[in-house]
Amino acid sequence: MTKHQPTQRAGFAARLAFAALVAAGTAAVPLAAGAADAAATFPQKPVTMVVPFPPGAATDIIARTVAQKLGEKWGQSVVVENRAGATGAIGSNYVARSEPDGHTLLVATTSSHTMGPNLSTKLPWDPVKSFAPVTLLAWAPNVLEVNPSVPATSMQELIALLKKNPGKYTFASSGTGSSIHLAGEMFKVQAGVDMVHVPYKGAAPAVADLLGGQVDIMFDTVALSLPHLKAGKLRPLAVTTTRRSSSLPDVPTMREAGLPDYEMAAWIGLLAPADTPPAVVQKIQADVGAVLQMPDVQAKLQGQGTDISGMSSAEFGALIKDELGRYGAIMKQAGIRPGD
């Protein structure tokens, strides 16, 4: 299995250490014969990987890349099915209600599983109890970017500009409560600035208006904006992770640029329905880890502006629980309430 990226927060490291101990203890318990047999013969039929977002975005491309390699490895077709809607809730609900045998999997994200659930009190599924975490696939850093008409070439220049003109400049997002939105709200709080949030129905139309100058600023995923950044149509000022993006090595992190407590790292991971046999989960995790080590897969995923990961089931589960609480607190601070 690939070595996962270093955790993005020091506080989360302790949770991972505990989770690893739990995982080690669990591994020492002999598996029931039936569970072991299920893992040995898995998959017994085609596997469906549900992407709870429209086709074409980084999540979908990553899912299809991994699915193709898993299909070759397993000798069974692995079909990617897009079930978009409600910030990932529709596709997530479908998988949560599916047969817990490993043949239906969910490609989950930060938005669908740690931010979206904080925005709704009526979800028919629970982000923790309804799923068995399999593994993390990749980190997807966001980048603070501006339309070239904005007179700022660094984050500090942008902060000075916003402080001089409170409420004048706008920042776009893919929707209220999305990782792109929360990245902007964190920036407002930590930088002590005021800018107007303009939510869109998806990141693509938001980027289109940013390119056109209808909005000024965005904290977009590196994956979507990378072609525009390379072409000089947008200006990158900082990335939101604690480490520089492999796709934008010359762009500083928010911490390097002057906000020492800033960190926002979106992720893409794989979940199975709750009660999926642990041996099956372990087999999928191991096989996905092998796929993530393939050079052509790494090149494809990094070309999408993501950084390859790979985590144990226990580590990934701890990450989800940690971020549910963390982003809930950020939303409360920003005045974002369930149902907004």
Image (cartoon, rainbow, N blue to C red):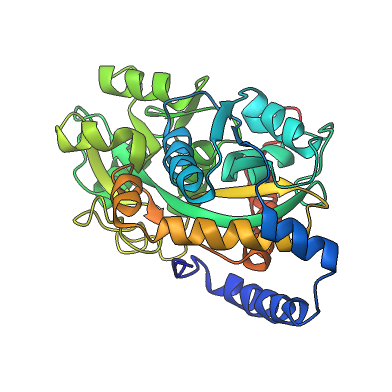
Is the C terminus in the top left, top right, bottom left or bottom right quadrant? top right
Asked if 215 appears above or below 231 in the picture, the reply is above
317 or 34: nearer the viewer: 34
312 or 289: nearer the viewer: 289
Residue at image location 14% in from the left, 32% down from the top: 231
Residue 149 point in image, percent of width and height = 20, 27
Q: Quadrant of residue 115?
A: top right
Q: Quadrant of residue 91?
A: top right
Residue 25 point in image, percent of width and height = 76, 82
Residue at image location 65% in from the left, 77% down from the top: 20
Residue 309 in view, yes or no: no
73 or 130: nearer the viewer: 73
Q: Is residue 229 left or right of residue 318?
A: left
Residue at image location 85% in from the left, 69% down from the top: 32
Residue 82 in view, yes or no: yes
Asked if 66 appears above or below 336 in the picture, the reply is below
Asked if 260 appears above or below 251 in the picture, the reply is below
Check the image and name the residue furthest to the left. Answer: 231
184 or 51: nearer the viewer: 51
Q: Quadrant of residue 124?
A: top right
Task: Give the number of marks.
Answer: 0
Q: Is residue 76 left or right of residue 339?
A: left
Residue 35 point in image, percent of width and height = 80, 62
Q: Is residue 144 left or right of residue 8?
A: left
